[in-house]
C-alpha cells in the first residue's frame, strides 16, 4: 500500500508543481482552432462523400458513373 500512496503523492506533486498549464486565453485560442479545424475537416469529408456518391438518393456520384461506364446494365428492349 505504501507504493500506491507514494505514487499518488508524486503524481499530485508533479501535476501541481512541475506541469506548466496553459493560461485561460491560450486555452480559449487553442479550443477555437480545434473547433474550426474540426468543422473544416467535417465539411471536407461531407463533400467527398457527396462527390463520390456515398449519399442516399438518385445521385450516384463519380464512382456510380464510373461503375456504370465499366459495367453497363443490359438494356432490355420491349417486344
Image (cartoon, rainbow, N blue to C red):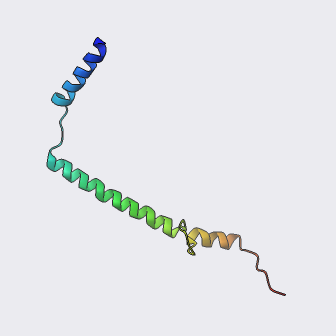
Residue lying at 54% horizontally and 65% vertically, measured from the top left: 54
Question: Quick one: quadrant of the C terminus?
Answer: bottom right
Q: Viewer-proximal residue, 26 or 57?
A: 57
Q: Is residue 30 left or right of residue 46?
A: left
Residue lying at 17% horizontally and 30% vertically, measured from the top left: 16
Residue lying at 15% horizontally and 50% vertically, measured from the top left: 25
Where is residue 58, by image quadrant?
bottom right
Q: In the displayed image of the protein, which residue is found farthest to the top?
A: 2
Q: Is residue 40 left or right of residue 59?
A: left
Looking at the picture, how far across and down is residue 50, in whole percent? Answer: 49, 69
Q: How many marks?
A: 0
Residue lying at 56% horizontally and 71% vertically, measured from the top left: 62
Looking at the picture, how far across and down is residue 18, in whole percent? Answer: 18, 29
In the rendered view, tell whether residue 37 sits above or below residue 27. Answer: below
Where is residue 15, by image quadrant?
top left
In the rendered view, tell whether residue 72 sits above or below residue 32. Answer: below
Looking at the picture, how far across and down is residue 55, in whole percent? Answer: 53, 68
Looking at the picture, how far across and down is residue 13, in whole percent? Answer: 19, 24
Q: In the displayed image of the protein, which residue is found farthest to the right?
A: 79
In the rendered view, tell whether residue 20 sits above or below residue 57. Answer: above
Q: In the displayed image of the protein, which residue is found farthest to the bottom?
A: 79
Question: Quick one: quadrant of the N terminus?
Answer: top left
Q: Is residue 3 left or right of residue 65?
A: left
In the rendered view, tell whether residue 5 sits above or below residue 19. Answer: above
Amino acid at each position: 500500500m505504501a507504493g500506491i500512496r507514494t505514487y499518488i503523492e508524486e503524481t499530485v506533486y508533479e501535476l501541481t508543481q512541475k506541469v506548466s498549464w496553459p493560461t485561460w486565453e491560450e486555452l480559449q485560442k487553442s479550443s477555437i482552432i480545434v473547433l474550426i479545424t474540426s468543422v473544416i475537416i467535417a465539411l471536407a469529408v461531407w463533400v467527398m462523400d457527396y462527390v463520390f456518391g456515398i449519399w442516399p438518393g438518385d445521385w450516384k456520384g463519380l464512382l456510380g458513373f464510373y461503375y456504370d461506364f465499366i459495367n453497363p446494365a443490359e438494356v432490355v428492349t420491349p417486344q
